[in-house]
Image: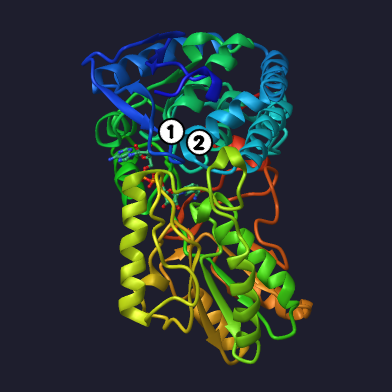
Amino acid sequence: MQTDERGALADQYGVLIDGTERASSSGETIDVFDPATGDQLTTVAAATEGDVNEAVDVAGDGFEEWRGYTPAKRCRILNDVARAIRDDHERFARIETLENGKPISEARGQVTRAARHFEYYGGLADKVEGESIPLDDDHVDYTIREPLGVTGHIVPWNVPIYLFARSVAPALAAGNAAVIKPAEETPIGAIELTKLLHENGVPEAAVNVVPGDGAEAGAALSGNPDIGTITFTGSTVTGREVGKAAIENLTEPHLELGGKSPLVVYEDGDLDVAVEETVKGIFATNTGQVCSASSRVVVHEDASDEYVEKLVSAVEDLSIGPGLDDHDVGPLASASHMEKVAEYLDVGREEVGDPVTGGRVLDRDGYYVEPTVFADVPQDARILQEEVFGPVLTVSTFADEAEAIQRANDVDYGLVAGVITTDMGRAHRFARDVDAGQIYVNEWFAGGNETPFGGFKDSGVGRENGTQAIHNYTQIKNVCLDISN
Ligand code: NAD
């Protein structure tokens, strides 16, 4: 068991309901492992359906208290939370690296983003405004944006602290109370962040955490009839189930799902930039475990040989190792996920032959897979169509702009897409014609907390981030008065 010196982890974690951390009602626990070594880090309670229902009930009380605060007070508290995250930055970064495996410098960046999210939505908490609607001289009409009540948040394991903040911060800013179900692999950040929210003035009943199994605790949360909305971030398969449960409850879900996002490299583009952005987009960020990873490169046939040569050289320079040692590429997040990625390496070999670099699971403790590039991949290959969610890239070629767009669009997903070109007409045509929620030009992962994020097609429903995300957590009430006498 790892202890304090590795990041102030407790020996065990519980469900966190109404500010009290306790065992689950069944006494069941889930072991949490360090992906860098495969050693056990700690254990966490596995919430039952009863625990989840209790958390939702408690959050109902928390909602009454929190919505009673003035917007200005909620604004100050959420800004205090942002400051407290920054003050405790290194501890949260170590937690993220310990439970997820990512390089510590990347974890620091994600914790900064989480703090920024509380700051950003804290700044909006007193700006959730309605409208005045002109009707005629005899009426006054206006709208009020009201909170939804208790909001549910189901979070995946790839960026656990930031993705908690991404939906919980706007939900709280709008006056809601929250129940969070973190992923089995990465529950600690959610529990510690919730304690910090309580310490900084958010009522204990207003934020509750129910760690546990997705099929039990996650399904209990998404199926609970007393939640006003569910924000789910995770796989498309699970997202469909969560969406069905939400519609059954007649609530609107926000589904942030998977991707298989294309980076199109034109022959007029800067190939060094293309290589740098590819490496960042699929290998050197969370070992490719990113929904918006640049997992498919589509390169002009005249530039393909030079691009692949430069890419292979850059990939082979990447260091692989434990996140706390801050290598370029960390381990995958779990043993089961490493097995899934390894299966895709076999699929790729069967479909297109040996990769041009990488392709091995490393023979060492922890969950390490080499950054891998498959070249000349046909459009219908599974390795090109399906989300691997690891350090595995496909490269295919195109002859003209029409084929580039056709290949970019020819998958079920539509989360993000990028283009490398110096021709701005081409860049705008790409932005117009490609079906994706975000378009990046000459830089992967462009934009930030302030820019709307979400998917077309099978990549999801709704948008996170930016000013409009606060509206995910409100409903409009129209008020009309007859003032004729
Ligand atoms: P997953 O769907 O297996 O799990 C996500 C969460 O859902 C976990 O907390 C899990 O416990 C829970 N869950 C599992 N079964 C459930 C059920 N039946 N009902 C309710 N909840 C359930 O996804 P994952 O493999 O953990 O995460 C990786 C996926 O997440 C990838 O597809 C990735 O692209 C996607 N993702 C999307 C975004 C985005 O913003 N679009 C961000 C990060 C990750």
* SS type, badge 1: loop
Sort mark 1 into few (<14), some (14-19) or many (20+) by Cα contacts within 10 Å: many
Residue at x-position 60% and y-position 9%: 199
Name the image colouring: rainbow
The residue singled out by tag 1 in the image is 186
Which residue in the protein does label 2 denote?
160
Question: Can residue 32 be seen in the rendering of this structure?
Answer: yes
Three-letter amino acid code at the position of disc 1 = Thr
Q: Dots 1 and 2: beta carbons under 8 Å?
A: yes
Q: How many marks?
A: 2
The residue closer to the viewer here, 465 or 372, is 372
Q: Quadrant of the N terminus?
A: top left
Q: Residue 120: image x %, image y %? A: 71, 32
Q: Compared to 269, does 243 lie above or below? A: above
Residue 271, compared with residue 209, is above or below; it is below
Foreground pick, 326 / 288: 326
| In the image, residue 193 above or below residue 38 | above
Image disc number at residue 422 = none
Q: Quadrant of residue 26?
A: top left
Query: Is residue 479 in sight in this rendering?
Result: no
Q: Which callout, 1 or 2, points at the residue further toward the start of the chain? A: 2
Q: Residue at x 69, y 24 (%)?
A: 82
**The quarter of the displayed image where residue 133 is located:** top right
Name the residue at 66% across, 70% down: 275
Instruction: Find residue 54 and report its horizontal and vertical position in percent.
Output: 32, 14
Residue 309 percent coordinates (x, y)? 62, 80
Q: Quadrant of ligand 1?
A: top left
